[in-house]
Each structure stands twice: as C-alpha cells, then as structure tokens.
Image (spheres, rainbow, N blue to C red):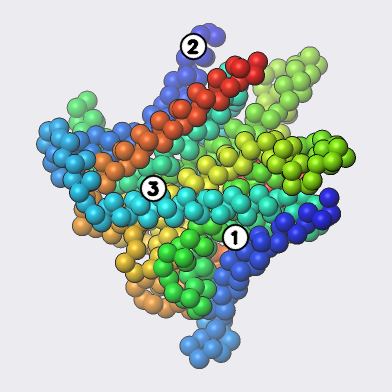
Amino acid sequence: MVKAKAFLKRFYVGLVFFLLYSPILVMIVCSFNSSKARTVWGGFTFDWYLQLFRDGAVLEAVRTSLLLTASAALIATALGTLACLGMAAMGKQSQGVLISITNIPMLNADIVTGIAVMLLFVRFMNLGYTSMLIAHVTLCIPYIILNVMPKLRQTNTSIYEAALDLGATPVYAFIKVVLPDLMPAIFSGFLLAFTISLDDFIITYFTKGAGINTISTMLYQEVRRGINPEMYAMSTLLFLAILLILFAANRISETQEEKGA
Amino acid sequence: MNKQKFLAGPYLVWAAGFIILPLLMVLYYGLTGDEGQLTLEHLAAIADPIHVKALWESLLIAAGSTAICLVIAYPLAYILSRSHIRQSGAVIMLFILPMWINFLLRILALQMILANTGILNAILRFFGLPRLHLMYSHGAILIGMVYEYLPFMILPIYNILCKIDRDVIDAARDLGADGITVFRRIILPLSLPGVMSGVIMVFIPGISEFVIADILGGSKILLIGNVIEQEFSLANDWGLGSGLSLVLMLFIFVSMPLMNKYDKTGEGQILW
C-alpha cells in the first residue's frame, strides 16, 4: 500500500515534468531534422547548426537579446538592492506604498505595461534600444525587490551595528557584513529577472524600434511564414548552455557546503 | 539607520518615471478624444458586442486555465514539498529552466504536438485510437495557457508549503487529528496565501494573453488581448486601445487588496 502510494507520487511528478519538457524535446529533435516541414522527419543533419553561425541576422538578434537582458538584469539588480536598503530604513506606511507600486508591473497585464511604456516613449523619445532597455529594467525590478526584501528583514542588524562600533565605515560594514548575507537572495533575484527578461515577448514587441530584433520578435515575424530551423538549433544551444551553467553552479555550491561542514 | 533612506532615491525616480507616468499616459489616451477633449467614448467601447464577447471569452479561458493549473499544481507542490529534495533549490530551477527556450518556440512546439497531423495524433493512430481535432479551438488555447503558466502556480504554492512548520503538523497529530483533518484544518489554511498568489499570477496574464490565442487558436478566436493588440498594431486607434487597456487595469484594483490581505508582513514575498 505504502509502496503503491510512493509509486503514484513519483509517477505524477514525472508525468507533469514530462508534459512540461515535451515541447522542448520536440524542438531539440527539430533542430536535427533535415526536412523543413515541421511534422516530417527527413533524416539527421547538423546543417542548421552550421548555417546558424553564418547567419548574420540571427546572430545579431541573439546578441541584442543577451546584451539587452544582461544589462537590464544588472541595472535592475543594482537599483532594486539599493531600493531595499533604503526601504528598510523607512516607516511601515511608506514601505507599504512602495511595495504596492513595485507590485504594479507584476499584477498588471504585460500587454498593458508594454502599451503604457510605449505611449510614454512615443511622446518623449524615439523607440529603439534604450526604450527596450528601460522597459526591461522596469519589468525586472520587482523580482529583485521581492527576493531581496524578505532576506534583508531576516538579517541581524546588531552585527552591522557591532561592525560600526568596532570602527568600520558604513560602506565597509555593508560590504563585509550585510552583503554576504544578502548575496544568495540577490543572485536568485538576478537569475529570475534575467530569465523573465530573456523570455519576454510582449513588452519587447511594443517598445522595440524599427530595425532592431531580439530572438522573440524575430520568431514572431517568422510565425506566419514558417520558422527557420536555425532558430531551433540556436535555442537548443542556449538551453544546453544554461543547463551546464546551472549544473556547474550547483556542484560548486555543494562542494562549498561540504567544505563548510 | 535613518540616513539609508536616500538609497531608495534612484528607484523612487525610476518608479515615478517608468511605472506611474506610463500608466497616467494610458489614462490620458484612454480618456481623451482626437482633439484632446475629455471623453468616455473609449471606455464605453467595451460595451460593443464584439468587445464584450472577447472579454467574456478571455475571462472564461483565464478562469479555466487557472482552475486546471491549480488542480495540477497543488498535489505536485505538496508531493515535492514533502520529499527529500526540497532543500536543494533544484526543484525551482527545474520549473524555471523551460523559460530559457523562447516562449514563442515552446508554443510552436506545442502546436506541432497538438496539430491534426501532429505528434499526439500520430501516437493515437499508432494505438488505433480516433484522431483528435484540437488545434484552432478554445481547447487548444486552454492547453497552451495551462502549459505556459503552470510554473507560476506551482512555485508560490511550493514555497509556502515548504515554510509550514513540521511541529504544527506533529502537534495536530499528537492531539489525535487524522491525515485528512491535518490537511483540511492545518495545511490547506496555511497554504492559502500561496494559492492566492498563484491564482493571481496565472489569471492576470491569462486574461490579456494574445500570442497563444494567435498561434494555437488561429485568428478565429478573438480575445480581449488580441483586440487591444490590433488597435495598436493594425488599426492605429491608440485611444480605443488605451480605453480597453484601462478596463484590464481594473483587475489590479481587485487583486491588489487581495494581495495585501494575505500578505500581512507587507513584503510582497508571496508572489514568488
């Protein structure tokens, strides 16, 4: 009875993960399919991978996407972490108001956020890389604040004050005492922001200027006329890259924990 | 520590300029006519039968996908939160990882699976089962949305279930509660904030979705998101598009108090 229950649980978890990952599996298979027709298997090929590295437009879109996402996530991390430190010093009421404002981009439908930012840009500046960057930073900041703020509340302020009493400058005490404590939260916020920004289509779609493409907007243009299989190859590589990075990061933190213990 | 307040300065400026001001722009465009005069015409346009139908279908599909997500996610989050891997953080990674494949590609891959000549039907045919006509229907959009938003339901529920103190459950058992009573009286009430944030995180993007409806629904099914998108990209009627967006923004005023009710510490952490 207990065994059957354990099996059922595993089966259920496995099934949901399988459903979640099956479209990705399909896409990886497609990246090796020599037929351009999506539902016909034409034989195994590496051609799309080779063509990908000769295709300037696709590489440019990948470069724009990664650059945009990395800059947006970094700027958001800096702004968001500073905001948390400032908010921690505020009274309950102003803190509550700020958190509510922070929640707006998450609670608002993406399409409304995208349109709102676009209306502002069209009025006061041109749409282009900068407008996309600003929109993406705005999209990212809530994820940083919502990750860092709870952690900041848990940190013990007396250690920070002790460091000050012992003669550390506030900046030195912050870097040596508070920051190491916050680092995991800042990092997970950054990772989440990076992922959300990279995956975003709707906000990019409304704020992008003519002639600029990210991976998302390039794909959207191709939806009607048929997807260039190079995109499958590109995504497969991107997926493998992040898988390796996360695996390595996990191993590093595990060995560190072992050393610590 | 009072001096620290100024550190929030840059973010305050940012929030005022790029969160509040843009929303005021929507308000401005939504409430003014061609000559800049005040008008309620764009807001009233929601009563147009086409728009009412689109909004109604959007609400139905969003509610449906939220319900299905909840039914799938709760048991999953519960099982994962009770397993030995709960501390590793790997679980959360596994749900975020698919997002590294572009959203559009995932939906297109889903299309290949669901299509009339797709993979699912090939498997059904292999077993001699009748073919399913899933594509370009409400069902296809529903499957797409459940697929896309399921992680947003799993993560908050999983997080909150992990935080429940084992001692509370043990205490209830010591006092004679059986498994069902423990779940009904202890676990379920304590996990409600996570359920609430999961529901909001699925329902809100669900109402305004237009890409999934575009790809999996064909252009036959018009959701409110499609209507708004077309006002901006095709019809160039920004006033009407903004007016309809304002209607969508009303849902914020419903969800914000709900969030605050369950988020007693004011940390907003229950969203993630």
Tell me which corner region of the image, top left, top right, bottom left or bottom right, holds residue A18. Answer: top left
Q: Secondary structure at mark 1?
A: helix
In which quadrant will I find the C terminus of chain B? Answer: top right
Q: Amino acid at mark 2?
A: Ala
Q: Which residue is mark 1?
A: B251
Relative to the observer, which residue lies in front, B267 or B62? Answer: B267
Relative to the observer, which residue lies in front, B267 or B153? Answer: B267
Q: Earlier in the sequence, mark 1 or mark 3?
A: 3
Q: Which residue is mark 2?
A: A4
The answer to whether the residues at label 1 and label 2 have Cβ atoms under 8 Å apart is no
Horizontal arrangement in the rendering, residue B126 relative to residue B85 (left or right):
left
Residue at horizontal 23%, vertical 46%?
A: A53
Q: Is residue A184 visible?
A: yes
Q: Is residue B83 visible?
A: no
Tell me, for residue B179, which label it has, or none.
none
Tell me, for residue B103, which label it has, or none.
3
Disc 1/disc 3 C-alpha distance (Å) = 24 Å
